[in-house]
Image (tube, helix red, strand yellow):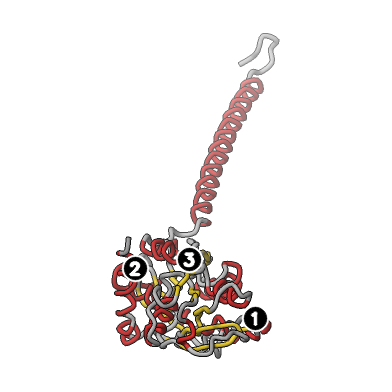
Amino acid sequence: MLSENGNKLIPVLGSRVLSQRACLLSAIFTAITVLTITTLTLILTMATGLNRVWAQPPPMSVAEKSFETPLQFGLLPYISTRKLFTYYLPLKQYLERTLGRPVRMSTAPDFATYIKRAEEGSYDLYHTAPHFAALAEQAYGYRRVSQYRRVLEGSILVARESDIKKATDLRGRTLLTPDSLAIITFLGEQWLRDNGMQPGVDVKVKNTPSHNNAILAVMHGEADAAVTASNVFETMLDETRERLRILGKTQRVPNVMFMSSPRLSDTEYRQLRQAMLSFTAKGAGKEFFAKTGYVDMVEITDNDMQSLIPFVIQLNNKFDMP
């Protein structure tokens, strides 16, 4: 077949076919390219999403979440807050290392408020007087953790140059005590009875905010005598101790105890108890016990709690007073 000018049409038709084939191939290539890019994008997006999922930590159990929450460490306000926090900072730091969670120390302005906060569940670890511990176990469901090995007793202090030489010389005088709910106060009042004097009748009993206040008042001549925990007096400055004299000693009772809030899980309780019982005078608590004079850390026994029943009754009677 010839064209108008007489040339054969075969070359012209071949060119058009080739052109169509090229367009078709180009379209196919473009479609494949778009499909490939889309597929790769989808794959990458899915992979990125999976990576994000894989990068997330697994959901924490209730027990694991609890270890992100600070352990509330309540401290009995038996001495000044500054001195209290200074004393117990090493124990706080030890617990943080051992338990792997933050520990927050707090106290209260007085013993009544402290007991009330314990009843309300403000403390996970309850550092407290022995009769407060027995009350917490009986009434609030707290569990035993540990106690100091050294027994607790009170020292009756007078000024070194005082004319008070024997117990009955306090008749008509004033005896300072810590908080009215303190077991040392109960012991001091019993010491007066054991020596034939009625508290509030033969001897005026006046409460002070802390052991420190009672001791310093006697040293400065503001009171005739004071009853304080023996270990507190022993840790006072030499200058203070040299200006005072021990007139007598009270009966002995179990010392300060540590109790666990009932809101702690069994696992948390076991770990806390183990950590506290490992804080010993020959181990992590060496410096603490050397400084405070509490000797060591031991378990709380049934006999310890049994011996505190009379003081819990006395404590409850105080609560019932108008």
How far is the residue under mark 3 from the one under mark 2?
31 Å
| Nearer to the camera, 235 or 217 | 217
* Residue 71 tag number: 3
What residue does disc 2 label?
Answer: 318
How far is the residue under mark 2 from the one under mark 1?
32 Å
Image point (35%, 85%), residue name: 304
Q: Amino acid at mark 2?
A: Lys
| Nearer to the camera, 240 or 263 | 240
Q: Amino acid at mark 1?
A: Thr
Could you tell me if residue 209 is visible in this image?
A: yes
Q: Quadrant of residue 251?
A: bottom left
Q: Tag 2 or tag 3, which sits nearer the N-term?
A: 3
Provide the secondary structure element on which disc 1 rests.
Answer: helix
Q: Quadrant of residue 10?
A: top right
* Residue 240 tag number: 1
Image point (30%, 79%), residue name: 310
Residue 237 position, x and y percent, is: 65, 81
**Disc 2 crowd, CA 10 A, few/some/many (<14, 14-19, 20+):** few
Does residue 206 lie above or below 62 as drawn?
below
